[in-house]
């Protein structure tokens, strides 16, 4: 009994100690510490959120691409509102009196629940209206304005490249719990990709309110306030002048135009047309349904989201693989009789001399040459069966970044598609297909999908003679160092010497001169040594797509470009001039007088009518 | 029925109870009323609470005068099984209110089985440990005791009612009285202290404190006290200067580990060596101390992991707010900040009944339930707050004393259970309102608004009062 007696006493002592600690703390809070003593004179705290300025987006030369302007939210504290001239109020903000009356009816209904809180009454009123309001603020007790920043687009370019900023919705809040209702966040494009850098940190100020509900000053001398931290400006790799020019060239056409700096992988310009007018981006809420319902899908970033067959530009890869595998040399010649025939299969080709050697096949884009070449790759006796040779072929292709996401910082990047031997084993059963079955791959048609970004990257890889840097939109600066993955060289499986051979062919394709059969003579600019390859991608729903990749100058290239114009017909007609103009603009800063007519033609032509409306509506 | 024993009814406890519930109602009215409301309006919450009070008195009377005392011991396990099953059922067929999945809703009435589980677990524990031949020494008996509180505790955690689960930790006090070593409680408190130091100051300080404690303990246990005193001074000096050493330029650049990892690398092998030695030599106290040290080191390093990965976001945020790691007066810290303001502004004498401005204008959320102490603090001031706390203390100590007087182990153990439940509720609730504990939502006994809460505490208390009477037979 003695032991348990002692334990009881220990427990009693424990209880007394616990209560004493509580009482001491109460003594501290209630008697000693002044901080918690709010007497009847100032009995309320008012919290005001301080929103930070969002980081701007600048181009590679610090030109502002996306900036901020201040608008105001009009806030109301219903319990403070006294009788006011509703009509005058509505006149300032161009409102209907019924709107105001309805709101106040709601406030009265939920009076207890609202209590002393401050609510948003009007969002984003322009500064002109706000300035008038401020002058008359004394007449509208209970209303205040709080500044918010919204986006401006000083150069009126970029559209879907930048994305837009709008208030977060319920879904977003669920997935991103650090945001609160009323916050803004970036959606799509760069605004989304760099949201973390751009958004900054919210702050708050705490004010003391007295019995008459007037603000009495800061709580705790502002010691508990949290300062808003402005977002970091993001410097992108985009060249504003080049982007602007590219958008003019692509106006009224459907497709993509991408320019990359091969030595770094930096994206100089990225145009997906049709795009969104930036004036509409700034007021996205107003125009949202219009944009969403536009059959040309302006918010859809075709450069990364639209995998299509590449067409003849893909011949270059087969050419490289052929050289690497040793099944073809630069002297190899193949015939072309208006195309290639084998058994029941016929692949057509345009009119040109025959036979052609390696370089000429590139210059004139001969389909037949590549049918022979492709079949020799797959039928190479070095391999036991087509599964093996095809898998090896696929390995080569993938090493250029095709068939997978490149890993850029562009949102919604698609991987595209490169078939594997499984693909055909499923379609035809194992052993049920041969090189002739998949011959369309020779010329970049069939079961193959590449995005314009893949093709631009391909152009850059060739320019570099065998490696690429992952394309990216953000430039490395002190404020935002870039991910090391953007500084890694990705080597292809092709020996670097073979690249010079196809470059010779690409050089001839542009410089060959009229009458030579070269397909890209419209890209010729004296002194620039542009090298390129045309493509005409078949389109079962309408006119073929016009494709061209190029880079310049031939040695020490500074820019690599892809132009992919949907329903543009032959590569030479639209893609070649557009790509070459943007190269010329970048390297020479202005277009030579002889080519100005071409430039004007590109600016003024309208291909939208050609796009099959039905194709889009079905989707 | 022996009417004679009713002359021995413990009136101090009953009167204290009545004072509390009346005072509770006054404060609930103060917290909830608006200008135009009438006092007896039963559509209001405080009107409803009058009904709860009335029915509680009826239940109290039933327990005192109608139900036989033997009922509780005989049916203890039945109650326990039924209530525990309902704890289980409510997870699946219950309604979720305020993030916790612990309510049954039948029409307009809502109640939580959790509140009643405290009663049934107390009765079951008393039945288990009060049985002849039970000793809190045999493994079988210890296990049964822990299971009895463990099963409901687990279910309560699954219901997301972490507050009530925490109350169950109070049952350790009952175990202590019934034979558990006090070391369990001491180690528990030390664990919490280490946890706090690691989070608020740094793991390095934590390890230093741990080493200090271990060396002191070993010194007390050993005969070579002077030797250990020397070691203590040496080690503490070294620990003090060690971080400075690591910061020196030529060392800092080559240093791969942080300070606390170096200390661990040195001390743990030494500890293990001595641990093995003490196992061989069978010096149990040394062995236990060294084991505690190793566990402590493990705890320090797992604090970060536990804190980031086991706790939910809002729980982590509340603890960060409490420990002053992060201040967010607009978000997580809002409730407690308002609460402290309300209580603090009461001053010595309070603002007077119905004159509390923070109370009147609804600045403190949940003011009639979890934060009812704010109303007391603001309107009745320091004097009033202390008076209520004294009343609580009186009730608790009186129950302890009465429990010890009983010859029936069942009654004594049940009494201790009642004390531990009420004590934990008071400590957690009041400390939360004054910023000594993170925000955990549990009611203040007899004072918070709520039918289930009031009924449960009434039943809890009055079963004891009735059982206490039996010693006069």
Image (tube, coloured by chain):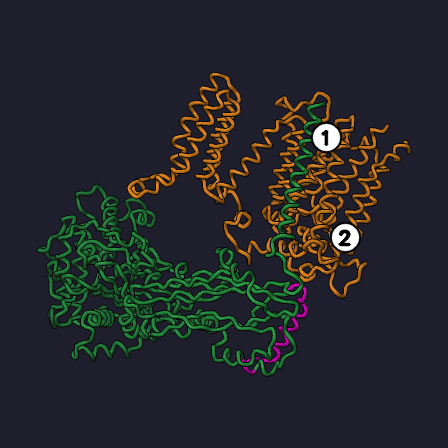
Q: Residue furthest left?
A: A331
**Circles 1 and 2 on the same chain:** yes
| Chain letter of the residue beneath label 2 in the structure image | B
Q: Mark 2, residues whose alpha carbon is within 10 Å: few (<14), some, or many (≥20)?
A: many
Report if residue A215 lies within the magenta region. no
Q: CA distance from mark 1 to mark 2?
A: 31 Å
Report if residue A93 lies within the magenta region. yes
Q: Mark 1, residues whose alpha carbon is within 10 Å: few (<14), some, or many (≥20)?
A: many
On the picture, is A11 further left or further right than A255?
A: right
> Which residue is denoted by mark 2 in the rendering?
B25
Q: Which mark is residue A367?
A: none
On the picture, is A457 further left or further right than A177?
A: left
Residue B218 spot, x, y in % from top left: 50, 25
Residue at figure coordinates x 60%, y 46% from the top left: B436
Rendered green, the chain in question is A
Residue at figure coordinates x 61%, y 29% from the top left: B182
Please identify the quadrant where the N terminus of chain B is shown.
top right
Residue B203 spot, x, y in % from top left: 45, 40
Residue at figure coordinates x 42%, y 67% from the top left: A164
Please identify the quadrant where the C terminus of chain B is shown.
top right
Q: Main secondary structure of the magenta part?
A: helix
The residue range painted magenta reads: A91-115
Identify whether B394 is placed above or below A35.
above
Residue closer to the observer: A213 or A425:
A213
Residue B358 spot, x, y in % from top left: 66, 60
Residue A297, visible in the rendered structure: yes
Residue A564, visible in the rendered structure: no
Colour of chain B in the rendered structure image? orange
Secondary element at tag 1: helix
Q: Earlier in the sequence, mark 1 or mark 2?
A: 2
> Which residue is denoted by mark 1 in the rendering?
B413
Secondary element at tag 2: helix
């Amino acid at each position: 009994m003695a032991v348990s007696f002692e334990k009881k006493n220990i427990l009693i002592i424990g209880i007394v100690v616990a209560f004493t600690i509580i009482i001491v703390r109460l003594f501290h809070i209630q008697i000693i510490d002044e901080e918690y003593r709010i007497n009847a004179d100032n009995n309320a705290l008012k919290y005001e959120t301080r929103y930070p300025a969002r980081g701007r987006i600048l181009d590679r030369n610090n030109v502002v691409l996306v900036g901020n302007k201040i608008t105001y939210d009009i806030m109301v504290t219903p319990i403070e509102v006294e009788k006011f001239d509703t009509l005058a109020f509505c006149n300032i903000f161009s409102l209907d009196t019924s709107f105001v009356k309805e709101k106040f009816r709601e406030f009265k209904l939920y009076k207890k629940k609202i209590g002393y809180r401050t609510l948003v009454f009007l969002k984003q009123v322009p500064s002109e209206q706000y300035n008038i309001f401020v002058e008359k603020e004394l007449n509208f007790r209970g209303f205040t304005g709080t500044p918010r920043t919204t986006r401006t687009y000083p150069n009126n370019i970029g559209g879907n490249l930048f994305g837009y900023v709008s208030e977060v919705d319920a879904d977003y809040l669920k997935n991103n719990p650090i945001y609160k209702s009323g916050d803004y966040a970036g959606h799509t494009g760069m605004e989304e990709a760099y949201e973390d850098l751009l958004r900054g940190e919210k702050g708050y100020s705490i004010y003391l309110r007295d019995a008459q509900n007037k603000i009495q000053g800061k709580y705790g001398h502002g010691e508990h306030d949290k300062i808003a931290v402005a977002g970091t400006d993001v410097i992108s790799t985009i060249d504003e002048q080049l982007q602007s020019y590219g958008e003019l060239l692509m106006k009224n056409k459907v497709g993509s135009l991408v320019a990359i700096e091969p030595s770094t992988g930096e994206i100089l310009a990225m145009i997906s047309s049709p795009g969104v007018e930036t004036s509409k981006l700034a007021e996205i809420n107003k125009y949202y349904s219009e944009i969403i319902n536009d059959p040309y899908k302006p918010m859809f970033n075709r450069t990364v989201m639209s995998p299509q067959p590449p067409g003849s530009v893909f011949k270059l890869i087969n050419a490289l693989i052929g050289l690497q595998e040793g099944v073809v040399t630069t002297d190899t010649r193949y015939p072309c009789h208006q195309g290639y025939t084998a058994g029941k299969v016929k692949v057509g080709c345009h009119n040109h001399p025959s036979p052609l050697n390696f370089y000429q096949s590139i210059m004139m884009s001969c389909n037949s040459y590549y049918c022979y070449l492709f079949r020799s790759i797959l039928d190479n006796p070095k391999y036991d069966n087509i599964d093996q040779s095809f898998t090896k072929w696929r390995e080569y292709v993938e090493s250029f970044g095709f068939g997978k996401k490149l890993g850029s910082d562009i949102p919604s990047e698609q991987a595209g598609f490169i078939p594997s031997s499984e693909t055909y084993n499923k379609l035809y059963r194992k052993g049920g297909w041969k090189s002739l079955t998949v011959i369309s791959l020779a010329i970049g048609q069939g079961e193959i999908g590449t995005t314009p970004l893949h093709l631009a990257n391909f152009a850059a890889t060739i320019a570099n003679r065998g490696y690429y840097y992952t394309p990216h939109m953000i430039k490395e600066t002190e404020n935002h160092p870039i991910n090391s993955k953007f500084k890694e060289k990705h080597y292809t499986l092709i020996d670097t010497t073979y690249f010079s051979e196809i470059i010779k062919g690409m050089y001839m394709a542009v410089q060959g001169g009229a009458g030579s059969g070269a397909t890209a003579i419209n890209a010729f600019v004296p002194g620039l040594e542009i090298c390129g390859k045309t493509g005409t991608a078949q389109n079962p729903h309408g006119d073929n797509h016009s494709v061209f990749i190029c880079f310049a100058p031939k040695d020490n290239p500074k820019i690599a470009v892809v132009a992919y114009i949907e329903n543009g017909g032959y590569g030479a007609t639209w893609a070649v001039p557009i790509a070459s103009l943007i190269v010329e603009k970048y390297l020479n800063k202005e277009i030579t007088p002889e080519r100005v007519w071409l430039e004007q033609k590109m600016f003024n032509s309208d291909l939208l009518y050609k796009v099959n409306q039905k194709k889009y509506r079905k989707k | 029925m022996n009417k004679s024993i009713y002359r021995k009814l413990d009136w101090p406890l009953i009167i204290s109870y009545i004072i509390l519930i009346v005072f509770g109602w006054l404060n609930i009215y103060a917290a909830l009323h608006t200008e135009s409301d009438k006092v007896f309006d039963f559509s209001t919450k405080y009107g409803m609470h009058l009904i709860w009070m009335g029915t509680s008195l009826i239940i109290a009377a039933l327990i005192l005068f109608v139900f036989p005392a033997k009922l509780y011991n005989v049916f203890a396990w039945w109650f326990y099984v039924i209530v525990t099953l309902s704890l289980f059922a409510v997870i699946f067929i219950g309604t979720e209110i305020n993030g916790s999945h612990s309510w049954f809703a039948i029409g307009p009435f809502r109640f939580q089985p959790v509140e009643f589980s405290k009663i049934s677990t107390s009765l079951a524990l008393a039945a288990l440990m009060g049985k002849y031949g039970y000793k809190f020494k045999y493994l079988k008996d210890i296990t049964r005791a822990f299971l009895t509180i463990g099963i409901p505790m687990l279910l309560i955690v699954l219901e997301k009612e972490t507050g009530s689960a925490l109350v169950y930790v109070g049952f350790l006090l009952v175990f202590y009285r019934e034979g558990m070593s006090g070391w369990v409680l001491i180690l528990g408190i030390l664990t919490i202290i280490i946890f706090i130091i690691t989070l608020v100051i740094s793991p390095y300080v934590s390890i230093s404190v741990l080493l200090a404690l271990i060396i002191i303990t070993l010194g007390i246990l050993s005969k070579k006290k002077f030797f250990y005193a020397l070691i203590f001074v040496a080690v503490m000096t070294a620990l003090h200067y060690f971080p400075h050493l690591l910061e020196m330029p030529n060392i800092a650049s080559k240093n791969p580990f942080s300070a606390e990892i170096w200390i661990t690398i040195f001390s743990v092998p030494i500890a293990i060596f001595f641990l093995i030695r003490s196992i061989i030599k069978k010096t149990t106290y040394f062995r236990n101390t060294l084991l505690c040290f190793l566990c402590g080191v493990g705890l320090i390093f797992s604090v970060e992991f536990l804190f980031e990965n086991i706790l939910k976001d809002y729980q982590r945020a509340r603890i960060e707010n409490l420990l002053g790691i992060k201040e967010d007066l607009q978000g997580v810290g809002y409730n407690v900040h308002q609460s402290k303001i309300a209580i603090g502004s009461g001053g010595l004498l309070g603002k007077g009944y119905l004159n509390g401005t923070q109370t009147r204008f609804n600045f403190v959320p949940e003011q009639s339930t979890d934060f009812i102490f704010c109303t007391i603090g603001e309107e009745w001031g320091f004097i009033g707050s202390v008076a209520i706390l004294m009343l609580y203390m009186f009730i608790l100590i009186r129950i302890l004393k009465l429990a010890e007087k009983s010859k029936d182990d069942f009654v004594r153990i049940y009494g201790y259970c009642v004390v531990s439940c009420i004590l934990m509720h008071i400590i957690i609730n009041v400390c939360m309102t004054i910023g000594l504990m993170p925000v955990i939502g549990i009611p203040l006994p007899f004072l918070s608004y709520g039918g289930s809460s009031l009924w449960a505490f009434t039943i809890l208390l009055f079963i004891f009062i009735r059982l206490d009477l039996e010693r006069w037979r």
